[in-house]
Image (spheres, helix red, strand yellow):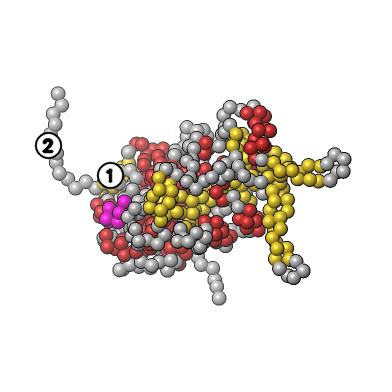
Amino acid sequence: MNTLEKPRFRNLDQGECAGAPILRKLWDRFDFSFLLTQSGIFKVRGTPTWIVAFLYMVGLIAQCTSVLQMSKLASRDALLQPLLQQWNLAQHTLSRFLTSKFNWALFGHKRVARLQQDSETALQEGDVVDLDDSVIDHPFGKMLSFLCWLYDSSQKISVWGMNLVVLHAVLRNGLEYPLSYKVWRKPAVKGDGPTKLDLAKEMLLALRQSTKCRLWVAMDRWYLCKDFFNFLTGNRFDWVTKAKRNTALFRKQIHPLTGRERYEPVNPAMLIKEVFTSLSKQGQVGLVGISVPDIYMKMPHFVSNRKGEHIKKYRYTAIAAVVAMRLKEDEEPEAAELEDTDEDKPATYRGAYVLISNRADAADEVLHVYAKRWRIEVFFRRAKQNLGLAKCHSTTEEHHHAHLELLFAADTLLGFAHWEMNKEKTSDGDGCTHGEMVRCLFHTRCQIRSKTRSGTQTISLDIGTEAVRFARLIQLFWPNEIRMFWGESAFSHVLPASA
């Protein structure tokens, strides 16, 4: 029989964030401390802002729902104490940092620009930028100007919250990270103020300041707007979306007797029925699609008349029309929004849809590009479940912008680590999911042991055996020095000379 002795009370040196040194190494790799300083985000009562920002990011990964919990985490965690250089990060320090009027939008712009300077994270020709919006529930700040009553299709109820318009990058090498966001403010009078399309244009133009390569923009049917399509093509963006029931399409035909061209209207549902038999024979599993040739749309363009006035006219423009089945979004059907009418719903027939794009010369790419649109939905779910996207209960607008930008920075570093972890996997059983990486490495307990030899203090970590599969990340990104500095010489980004 086993006997149970009474417990002995000891000061156990334990930590809850075993992956914090890796996170700090990635923070230095992309010069986030330097970018904060460049953005005018300086010290708060003597505490460096990059120390406070890094703690907030660690707190998001540790699922701390308030600055009080983050402050307590920094004071009790034996691993964070030497990493943060014994700074007294009290609750009021974090609160004043987050509620100060810093230019967080500039920090987000510099973060994206810095990512484009790295060969592994830079957007290349043919990469995909996902565009979508999400409703963030916020019943706490009734007086915030960007909050209003919105319909949440996932919960099927109207909530008091904000509507976030987001750009998300999906690279061909498998890496993905959030780019930028805008908060859409519901106008008091319908038609006043910028729309979500206007906000999307602002973000895409800002992205053009960092990269000039030709990119895809994948979006859902809500963003189906011909003027918006012209804006995309005018700025070297290729677009792909899903056709609605009332989308006006035309088929180009040649008259057998006169040889003249004519364009006959065709319904999107008719296109699906024409090729559905052939489509269903392609396979029982996996994404399948068939391209329908000679499909056109009437696209607007402006011409000048004799008086010099600009007149809008329409011309037939060739587009790619692809009938697809078994899209990822079919596995989790989206709820119909309150404002959706029958015309706004997607054109469908027995689970098949019509995808349209301006790239009539690259119809084979359209299906695979649109399949990557679902990655932004995964990002929203991941940010809400693992990073507390909807758990910012502050009643100040500055705190919300700081929360969102630091959350985007945290997801960027976690996304890069996840990509490195799965880059060399050879089968579906290898690698790990994003949630497994966060739970088993970045937010897992560890035992801390400190030793001093010849005047040098050495810190050792004991982590559970479930973290053995993350040995690749530890080998790549484990720092030699635990303390956090303003920048690291090996990865420090130098400002170019300017007049």
The residue drawn where x is 41% and y is 59% is: 146
Residue at the extreme top of the image, as rendered:
1
Report x, y in % for residue 268.
Answer: 65, 40
Q: Magenta residues?
A: 65-71
Q: Which mark is residue 307?
A: none
Few, some or many residues within 10 Å of mark 1 (<14, 14–19, 20+)? some
Please say if the residues under marks 1 and 2 sit with CB atoms less than 8 Å apart.
no
* Circle 1: element type: strand
Few, some or many residues within 10 Å of mark 2 (<14, 14–19, 20+)? few
Residue position marked by numbered label 2 in the rendering:
6
Is residue 284 among what the camera can see?
Answer: yes
The residue drawn where x is 43% and y is 63% is: 104
> For the C terminus, which image quadrant?
bottom right
Residue at the extreme left of the image, as rendered:
6
Report x, y in % for residue 413.
Answer: 44, 51
Report x, y in % for residue 424.
Answer: 51, 39
* Circle 2: element type: loop
How many dots with numbers? Answer: 2
Separation of residues labelled 1 and 2 (CA atoms): 22 Å
Q: Is residue 69 magenta?
A: yes
Q: Is residue 57 above or below residue 322?
A: below
